[in-house]
Image (spheres, rainbow, N blue to C red):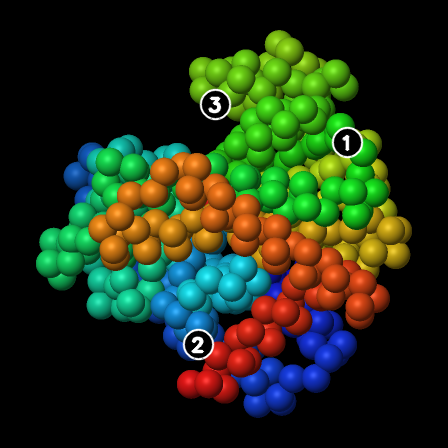
Amino acid sequence: MNNPFQNALQQLERATKLTSFSPDFLKRIAYPDRQIRITIPVKMDDGTLNMYEGYRVQFNNARGPYKGGIRYHQDTDIEEVKALAFWMALKCAVVNIPMGGGKGGVTVNPKELSKTELEALSRGWMRGMSDVVGPQKDVPAPDVNTTPEIMSWMADEFGKITGDTSGAVITGKPIENGGSQGRGTATAQGGFYVFETLREKLGLPEVCRVVIQGFGNAGEHAADIWTKAGHKVIATSDSRGAIRNPDGLDIPALYEHKKATGSVAGFAGGETFDAHELLFQACDLLIPAALENQIQEGNANRIQAKVVLELANGPTTPEADDTLFARGIPVIPDILANAGGVTVSTFEWEQNLKDEHWSEEEVFEKLRVIMDREALEIFEKSKALSTDLRRAAFIIALERIQQAMLEK
Ligand code: NAD
């Protein structure tokens, strides 16, 4: 199977066939501006020294400072980070915010580290990167397995090294340390606004049966938001198992169960089943909210959803995209569906720079306007070009990036 960056390049090639871009632009946009690798020494609690590999890929900054999260995962490598950085550049252009694309990571299983070790690793990442990040250069944020607390340690470390204590170097911080209202739920909330804008157009019923893969930041908030809006979340999963209930899961109770046991599996309000079967449950809306390459050539035929909304980055391979398109299953692509996270991150950056504090209401109103507008534009473009929503989103984003590069 392709690595995520190969998939990203394939998506690029497929989308740009439909319209004309400058050949030089197409060549440039397939390469990141910079790839940084560092080694982070961490003194473990037992006195031994461990070495970890950390990354930052700065893909494109034609539209503004590089922007994108930092992932801690045992399988994270530079190719994955490169793909995620590329998607960030497109995502920021899709929602038309003044940011470029970047991404970071560390190859580590953070669950094996104590809190002190995690703090040392996070401060070490920032020490290694402090000369390449900054409020006007590159603004990281959380991603898989990184939390507001980790962002806080990193912001503090950056302040100690550079004297810049505005906090604008990093977003996704806790509210008391300069975080924005609404950032925690922004990714799912943004996805929900897109869903609401497109629901009828995509032929979905008023009350949808929803299946969510992943019950982390993106997935668990999605479960809560869709449920509160009157839809039924009938199945969800995490890395340890899956749970289903055709009448709808009790999300607050499931959340408590996960807090107590570490997994959704074994929840008394449903039937525990094999997590590999989660994607194939019959439903109206399937929301992948875990990792890349989940819907692939080998399993796209088994999807029984009417629509897929990608809260995860890169969950559908290009081959699977074709299968789903041929089967009449629209995929609302990651670079639109999960762009609420980076949009509210950018609001946080703006508030830090201006020393302002916006209410949650204000944040979500601004977010809704952006997500509604861009969802409609992408939908109309897909109709005009008789293509899928991903190609339409790519074309709109690439046109905006090309324009910014030309202006520079
Ligand atoms: P997270 O670490 O909070 O949660 C990830 C969840 O996925 C966990 O519940 C984990 O158990 C589950 N998971 C891992 N492997 C799985 C598997 N094989 N099957 C089922 N579940 C599995 O991460 P997150 O922040 O929620 O991110 C999830 C996805 O959303 C990622 O692709 C991320 O890049 C994307 N995303 C997140 C944000 C954000 O603001 N958090 C923004 C944009 C995109």
The residues bearing labels 1 and 3 have C-alpha atoms spaced at a distance of 33 Å
Q: Residue at x 17, y 39 (%)?
A: 47
* Quarter occupied by residue 115: top left
Disc 1 target residue: 206
Disc 3 target residue: 262
Q: Earlier along the polypeptide chain: callout 1 or callout 2?
A: 2
The residues bearing labels 3 and 2 have C-alpha atoms spaced at a distance of 42 Å
Secondary element at image label 1: loop
> What is the x, y in percent for residue 319?
77, 60
The residues bearing labels 1 and 2 have C-alpha atoms spaced at a distance of 41 Å
The amino acid beneath tag 1 is Glu
> Would residue 112 be found to the left or right of residue 194 on screen?
left
10 Å crowding of disc 1: few (<14), some (14-19), many (20+)? few
Q: Residue at x 79, y 48 (%)?
A: 201
10 Å crowding of disc 3: few (<14), some (14-19), many (20+)? few
Q: Earlier along the polypeptide chain: callout 3 or callout 2?
A: 2
Q: Nearer the viewer, residue 129 or 398?
A: 398
Q: Residue 62 carries which label?
A: 2
> What is the x, y in percent for residue 312?
58, 47
Reply above or below: 57 against 407: above
* Quarter occupied by residue 153: top left
Q: Can residue 292 be seen in this view?
A: no
> What is the x, y in percent for residue 405?
48, 82
Secondary element at image label 2: loop
Q: Residue at x 82, y 52 (%)?
A: 324
Q: Residue at x 33, y 40 (%)?
A: 148
